[in-house]
Amino acid sequence: MQSKENSSSINSATPVKGKASAPSKGKISVMTLAIMNIVAVVSLRGLPAEAEYGLGSIFYYVFAAVFFLIPVSLVAAEMAAAWPQKGGVFRWVGEAFGARFGFLSIWLVWIESTIWFPTVLTFAAVSLAFIGPNQTWDASFSSNKIYVLIVCLVVYWGATLINLRGVQAGATISKWGGLIGTIIPAAILIIFGAVWILTGHQSQMTISAKDLVPDLTKFSNVVLASSIFLFYAGMEMSAVHVKEIENPTKNFPKAIFLASAVIVAIFVLGTLSIGFVVPTKQINLTQSLLVAYDDFLKAFNLGFLSPVIAIMLAIGVLAGVSTWIAGPSKGLLSVGQAGYLPPFMQKTNKNGVQINILLVQGGVVSFLILLFVVLPSVQAVYQILSQLTVMLYLIMYMFMFAAGIYLRIREPNQKRPFSVPGGKIGMFIFAGIGLLGAVLAYVLSFLPPSQISIGSKSTWFLLLGGGNVLFVALPFIIYALRKPSWKSASSDADMEPFNWEKTPVSSTSKKS
């Protein structure tokens, strides 16, 4: 456990002269953390939706990277290096605005990931359906509700059982599952796309300079530009593992920047590859990724590998789900043990894993999966929950960016082993851009999508507005009801106090 009096003690260990400094047993390496970040952020299932916009998708990806991914990465890297204690966004936001808002932030990360699980699990079911030899039959089978229900539940609870074995088991699945199921399939897709063009095959996507920049005078294009921000969400999540990486003040930023470069490349090149082979009018949001692989493989006489690719993509979903099961729930446990959750939610198993939090989360996810499969208007419900997920996450990002700016003003002397380029001015610029982008994306998220029938617009606004109010209010209610007995005996050593708790402050500025 690092000394809470001096965060620089992270670098205090000096290796024996003449010997290489090896990672400590049980520590997560830079490469493993980078892959965990890539797996947490990248989802190949979203590529077909952007492939509909042709070369214009490049603009959207780069725009979102500049106004969201880069600010998130830089701000998270600085705050994780300056405040490497456990807690992640709880620590950063709480340090700036008090424990109440810190708890809100970590709660939002956990609850939005819980709501998000059913959508990504459906993609796993579709992937596995395409292991058959007949594409038409596979597509039909992937639409079977009972089949989707079973696969979603098996994959989710399988990932949960893996995480119950401990952090190393989850990290191993994230690393190798992400490599096999996300990074390698992405590389294969990109290589196929390049070979397709270089060998003279006809591109189904119009390729011209005028298509690179979309018409931003159209409101629908502005909405898309903001909605794509959440393609890059999740880079800050690995902060909950900051004490499990060797030399975090140096290696955490390294992992973030390595992951960022790979993520942008995968999104841009993968989307173009799908557009090269699948006609725009035939793009299906759930099946076109598998169809693109199938078309590429058949064109290059490798059709027998289609089932292998389908299985790899399903493994990628398992790795992504495993990463998101572990991260937010682990952060919530650390905060809960400091007295913010009742004892029931603080229970851990013999491996130190947050068993009751995972069981409660699993119950909610299972209910949503069952609800989606049973209800007739699945697509509309999916879209509402997807939008709600985005909005809850954006609220957390608003607090994170605001905290980065505020802490630069209030705690200028805090040791920052890694700083946003440009120092204080750089933080104002990058966090300011990120904050404005998050606010814009949040407001535009209330608008219903034109390509999906959502029924009554008043119902749409009511559900989204009600969902925002409910899930933001819940952590404030829990915070107000907390009792001294909720604080775990081990929390003093595990969850270090905020700086404002160590230094006497006036009654007007005291955090609560």
Image: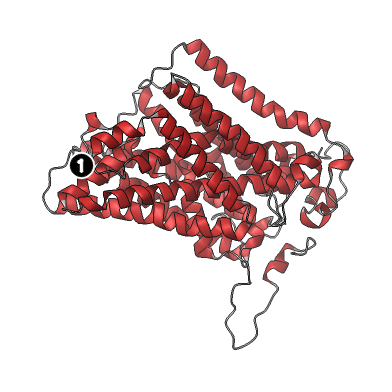
- Residue corresponding to mark 1: 277
Q: Amino acid at mark 1?
A: Val
- Relative to 46, say whether 254 is above or below: below
Circle 1 — which element? Answer: helix
* Residue 162 shown left or right of residue 203 in the figure: right
**On-image quarter of the N terminus:** bottom right
- Relative to 341, say whether 197 is above or below: below
Residue 241: x and y in percent read 62, 56
Residue visible at 54% across and 49% down in the picture: 322
Residue 290: x and y in percent read 30, 42
Residue 357: x and y in percent read 68, 42
* Residue 31 shown left or right of residue 96 in the figure: left
Report the colour scheme: secondary structure
Residue visible at 61% across and 25% down in the picture: 468
Residue 162: x and y in percent read 57, 52
Neighbour tally class for label 1: few under 14, some 14-19, many 20 plus, Cα within 10 Å: many
**How many marks can you see?**
1
Based on the displayed image, in which of its 4 quarters is residue 511 positioned? top right
Residue visible at 53% across and 64% down in the picture: 30
Residue 81 visible in the displayed image? no
Based on the displayed image, in which of its 4 quarters is residue 272 positioned? top left
Q: Given the current orientation, which residue lies at the most extreme left position?
A: 200
Viewer-nearest residue: 288 or 426: 288
Residue 373 visible in the displayed image? yes
**On-image quarter of the C terminus:** top right
Viewer-nearest residue: 21 or 120: 120
Viewer-nearest residue: 61 or 486: 486
- Relative to 453, say whether 405 is above or below: below
Viewer-nearest residue: 222 or 386: 386
